[in-house]
Image (cartoon, rainbow, N blue to C red):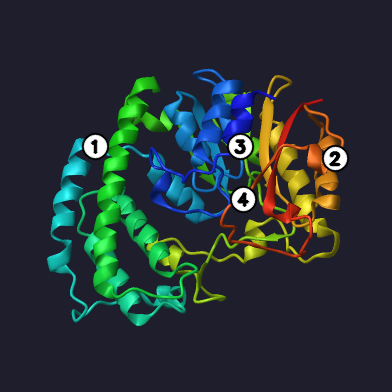
């Protein structure tokens, strides 16, 4: 195994650079790991697929490296964030949003009347009233922006601020602190986008305004992707699949924020203006407490059968996967991959022999409590078609 890959796998530094800090999506891998894998296994112009895209770490790095990118995720929250992180802003966008931002403090007053569409009432569950009203005021002001691109960018800043204020927090800030943090976050995001675009221009072979010619992001299941006409046919076969799929038996909250312990709110979907009608098991391929995790492995098999149709014998599949109980789940995972027609590149004799990384500040819960702490690790899996 190339030393650079192992070094990148075990990086402990905070995630930053480009637009990666826009939103903290659960279980994402480090951008430097993604970049190292991309540069090692692909060349400029190659197609990279992330079938469980999340917030778009692979997408950002693939585009900056001059690759084509196809991303798929069933979660509209994921595709929203990934799209905002990879959609360039025009000079007019940057100037217009900076001017708009300067007026925010004077335009937000908690005593002002503001209404919310009744369809979003259920999405504000467990959100303290002052935070709810502050978000309502900001969303109302966002509608005064000039373009849909600007509005989505600003909504992403509200999303990031809402996560800062509410998710896994015991102390909830006041309205003034929320607005101040929003202003700071949006300012940083605009600067990050400016730097991202400078790097994008170095390797992208089309104008920034034509990013869609090199990027496709689909909010759907990867199952049946071979029949989706939105997939660019001449991008096949993909050279690399780089992904981190849902983890078997592991509880990761992709579609809610947790407030003051185990209280949950679907507020992120209200903020991005997209309904969410699905339960957690929909986003995790199956319920974590099901005996034998049969649904999970059935859905995993169907997913990688569809992915297979986009590949050939030269394609590489790189995954980072965590397990609640690796002693049997890892073996079953590899069996499923083998049944479909994928062969692991490296040979290992046991769990301790495998390349893995400890997950810092873990925000998920496993079904099992293992004394060996393997449930706190992600394993590096690399396959090719048999």
For label 1, the residue is: 90
- Taking the spot 31% from the left edge, 40% from the top edge, the residue there is 193
Label 2, label 4: how far apart the Cα atoms are: 20 Å
| Residue corresponding to mark 4 | 359
User: What x and y, as percent, mark residue 166?
Assistant: 43, 70
Q: Is residue 51 above or below residue 366?
A: above
Q: Is residue 248 above or below residue 198?
A: below
At x 47% / y 33%, what residue is drawn?
A: 61
Where in the figure is residue 93, as x and y percent of width and height? 22, 43
The answer to whether 227 is drawn above or below residue 167 in the figure is above
Counting residues from the start of the chain, the first of labels 4 and 3 encountered is: 3
Q: What residue is shown at x 22% (from left), y 78% (from top)?
A: 110
Query: Rounded to the nearest whole Å, what is the CA distance between mark 3 and mark 2?
Result: 19 Å
Cα separation between marks 1 and 2: 52 Å
Q: Earlier in the sequence, mark 2 or mark 4?
A: 2
Q: Are marks 4 and 1 in contact (CB under 8 Å)?
A: no
Is disc 4 surrounded by few (<14), some (14 to 19) or many (20+) residues within 10 Å? some
Name the mark on residue 350: 2
**Closer to the camera in the image, 51 or 128:** 128
Q: Closer to the N terminus: mark 4 or mark 1?
A: 1
Q: Is residue 230 visible?
A: no
Q: Secondary structure at mark 4?
A: loop
Per the image, label 2 sits on a secondary structure element best described as loop
How many numbered marks, from 0 up?
A: 4
Q: Is residue 161 left or right of residue 316?
A: left
Query: Which residue appears at 39% of the width and 49% of the height?
Result: 22
Residue on which the image places disc 3: 9
Q: CA distance from mark 4 to mark 3?
A: 11 Å
């Amino acid at each position: 195994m190339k030393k650079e890959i192992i070094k990148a796998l075990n990086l402990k530094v905070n995630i930053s650079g480009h637009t990666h800090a826009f939103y903290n999506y659960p279980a994402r891998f480090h951008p430097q790991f993604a970049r190292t894998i991309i540069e090692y296994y692909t060349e400029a112009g190659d197609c990279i697929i992330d079938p469980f895209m999340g917030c778009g770490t692979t997408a950002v790095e693939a585009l900056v490296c001059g690759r084509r990118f196809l991303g798929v995720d069933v979660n509209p929250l994921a595709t929203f964030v990934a799209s905002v992180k990879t959609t360039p802003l025009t000079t007019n966008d940057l100037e217009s949003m900076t001017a708009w931002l300067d007026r925010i403090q004077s335009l937000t007053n908690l005593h002002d009347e503001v209404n919310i569409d009744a369809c979003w009432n259920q999405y504000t569950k467990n959100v303290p009233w002052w935070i709810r009203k502050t978000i309502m005021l900001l969303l109302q002001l966002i509608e005064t922006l000039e373009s849909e691109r600007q509005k989505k960018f600003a909504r992403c800043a509200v999303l990031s601020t809402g996560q800062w204020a509410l998710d896994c927090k015991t102390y909830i800030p006041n309205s003034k602190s929320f607005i101040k943090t929003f202003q700071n976050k949006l300012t940083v995001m605009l600067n990050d986008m400016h730097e991202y675009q400078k790097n994008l221009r170095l390797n992208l072979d089309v104008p920034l305004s034509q990013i869609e010619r090199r990027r496709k992001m689909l909010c759907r299941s990867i199952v049946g992707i071979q029949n989706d006409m939105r997939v660019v046919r001449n991008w096949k076969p993909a050279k690399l699949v780089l992904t981190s799929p849902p983890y078997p038996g592991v509880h990761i909250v992709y579609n809610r924020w947790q407030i003051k312990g185990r209280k949950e709110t679907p507020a992120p979907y209200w903020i991005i203006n997209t309904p969410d009608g699905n339960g957690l098991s929909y986003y995790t391929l199956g319920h974590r407490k099901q005996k034998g995790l049969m649904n999970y492995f059935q859905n995993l098999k169907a997913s990688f059968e569809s992915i297979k149709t986009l590949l050939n014998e030269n394609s590489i599949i790189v995954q980072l996967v965590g397990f609640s109980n690796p002693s049997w789940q890892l073996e079953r995972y590899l069996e499923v991959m083998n049944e479909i027609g994928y062969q692991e590149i490296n040979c290992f004799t046991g769990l301790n022999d495998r390349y893995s990384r400890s997950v810092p500040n873990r925000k998920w819960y496993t079904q099992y409590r293992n004394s060996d702490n393997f449930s706190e690790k992600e394993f590096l899996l690399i396959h090719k078609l048999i």
